[in-house]
Amino acid sequence: MSATFARLSLNTMTTKTWNLRRAVEATAAAGLPAIGLWRDRVAEAGVDDAAKLVRDNGLRVSSLCRGGFLTGIGDGDTALDDNRRAIDEAATLGAPELIMVAGGIPDRDLPGARARLADRLATLVTYAADRDVRLALEPLHPVFCADRAVISTLGQALALAAPHPATAVGVVIDTFHVWWDPELAAGIAAAGAQGRISSFQICDWLVPMAADPLVSRGMMGDGVIDFGVIAAMVSAAGYDGDIEVEIFNEAVWATDGHAVLDTMKDRYRDLVLPGLRQGR
């Protein structure tokens, strides 16, 4: 395996049209060491078979996506049960991080949604820690606050994580969601100092955006994000884990997956890796 790509991971959403076997085998054939899994792909194969498939191809699981959506009105039992299942799946897969997307605002009460999130997160922490799975809080760009995530910045994610051990609750740095934040440098430094960086996910912010912001994630270099600067911050903060390419984009999904992998490797090498080395 090339040292250049020793930390690079394909998130299965980037090659959405591939089933799990095809994604795993292509990732291994491309010389990458890791894969980030979505639960739908795992469910198609079955969690035990998925874990064996990954192991047999010599890969590690960088993260499992996703848990969360803990802001609903009511007792929250359904959401909590689903999150416990996600934690169990992560443990079986050997995924050290379960990506947590907070959930949106069901009733116009933003403080109430955030309070329910905090309470329900606390309910899950011990269950996850007992299974060696860290809950990785992912702040999403504010455009998604209403329907997907009531935490929008690393600062908010760190505040939510603060009552819990860093080994139990971390944060995700996803370039698409955090590049705009004027406090990004301070947030990354704080996350690193606290030992809470769970995952570094990369893709670009395209201009103009697609009609659906969810599928406006582009290949690195196709948009406005300065990956060298952010990668240097993450590296300087002490993060040395896997780096996932996670892209939601109709044009990328329509492209041959092997070509996507080749482009992803080239862009990582040219745009991200120099920043990682600079930040050491």
Image (spheres, rainbow, N blue to C red):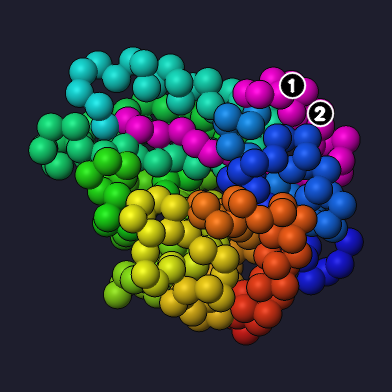
- Position of 156 with respect to 235 (left or right) is left
Tell me if residue 103 comes above or below residue 240 in the rendering: above
Q: Position of residue 137 (x, y in %)?
A: 42, 46
- Position of 1 with respect to 204 (left or right) is right
Q: Which mark is residue 52?
A: 2
In this orientation, which residue lies closer to the viewer: 191 or 14? 14
The answer to whether residue 145 is seen in the rendering is yes
**How many neighbours does mark 2 have within 10 angstroms: few (below 14), some (14-19), or many (20 or more)?**
few
Find disc 1 in the rendering and name its residue.
Answer: 48
- Residue range in magenta is 43-70
Where on the picture, by quarter, is residue 186?
bottom left
Q: Position of residue 131 (x, y in %)?
A: 60, 27
Residue drawn at point x = 54 percent, y = 39 percent: 65
Q: Which mark is residue 5?
A: none
Tell me if residue 278 comes above or below residue 80 in the rendering: below
Q: Is residue 203 magenta?
A: no
Residue drawn at point x = 49 percent, y = 79 percent: 226
Residue drawn at point x = 32 percent, y = 42 percent: 148
